[in-house]
Every structure is written in structure tokens, then in C-alpha cells.
Amino acid sequence: MADYTTDSRMEDEGSRLRQVAVVYAEALLEVAQSRNQADEVGEELTALVNDVLRKEPVLADTLTSPVLKRNAKAPILENVFKGRVSETLYSFLQVLNNKNRLNLLRHVASAYRDLLDVKAKRVRVKVRSAVELTAEQAEHLRQTIGHALGREPILVPTIDPTILGGLIVQIGDEVYDNSVRSRIESIRNQLMSRSSHVASIR
């Protein structure tokens, strides 16, 4: 039996962490902008998450561990990041450590990227397709979405053979499902509904 209480608590905790991360991301962006480093810091954050935390799970677990004290993490941050990232980002990492908030790094990176997108009038568009889109298809999709939203779409493609064909496009919380699988499911549901109606008449 599913433990819905536990799931709800996890969702609430995740939501709370994301809200706190936005505050830190806004503060970081303000400092980065004052130093004309907004995009640079954004690229560094993305690289930190994708190239360091994901590929070095031991380091990630060490930095986010609630057991290891911040005094022990500080020299690790210095050895790994000092001189390898901008002084702005390095100072920010130390601030997170001092606040025992290094567990927010992934959330901060995501929130910072979203803030940059809003500033630049960009919007991230998740696109799932059965096969990789051609350059022409991707450009047509970008132009269509850009014209509709008045913002520059940044496509984030994913290959998903289970959808058979067509596309599933997600913009924020909105999902537009034009996949073959979705259409098959729709037809199947209609047929089942019609069969049930016929059976009830009999």
C-alpha cells in the first residue's frame, strides 16, 4: 500500500527547498549582474551540476552531507573550486556552506537559469519525440512557439521511442501531447466507451 503521507511530506520538502533556492539564486544574480558576470556565473553553475556533482557522486554526497560539518567542507570547496571558477561563484559556495545550504546547489542552479531566461525573454521547452528532430523540424517548432509566446524558445529534446511518433511538448506546467501513442489511447478509450454504451442498451 502506497504511503501517501510520506510522498506528500517529500513533495512539501522539495517545494520548500526550491523556494529557498530562489532567494539564494536572486541574490547571486544581483551580485553577478553588478559585476557583468550574469551569464558566466550561469554557465559555471550548470557545469558544476552537470560536470561535477553528477559525475562525482562521492564529492556531491560529501558536500551535501548533513553529518559533515561546514568547517570540514570549507577546505574541500577551496581545493576543488578556488581558482577554477569565478570569485563570485566561489564566494557564493562558501556562503552556502556557512549557512549549511550546499544541499540547495541543484535547486539554485535551476532557479538561476530560470531567472536568466526571464531576463532574456527566453523559455525552456521540453520536447519528447520518438526519433531525433531534424534541423528543419526543430527550427519550425522554435519559430511556431516563439511566435505564439513572444519569447525565444530553448528546446530541450528527449528521445522517447514509446510515444511511437509525433511530439509531446512541455512549456512550464503546460503539456501539449500530439503523440501517436496519445491518439491511439484516445481512440481506444472512445471505442471502449462506445462498447460500454452499446452493451448497456442491450
Image (cartoon, grey):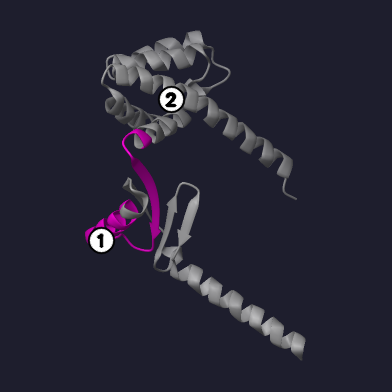
In this rendering, is residue 16 above or below 168?
above
Check disc 2 and report the residue beneath it. 25
Give the quarter of the image for residue 42.
top left
Q: Amino acid at mark 1?
A: Thr
Please state, as top left, top right, bottom left or bottom right, where the C terminus lies in the image.
bottom right
- Percent across and percent down for residue 196 are 70, 82
In this rendering, is residue 28 above or below 49?
above
- Percent across and percent down for residue 53 are 41, 30
- Of all residues shown, which one is farthest toward the bottom? 202
Where are the magenta residues, as a range? 118-146
Residue drawn where x is 62% and y is 38% of the image: 11
- Image check: 187 left or right of 51? right
- Image check: 177 left or right of 133? right
Q: Nearer the viewer, mark 1 or mark 2?
A: 2
| Label at residue 134 | 1
- Percent across and percent down for residue 168 are 43, 59
Residue 126 is a magenta residue: yes
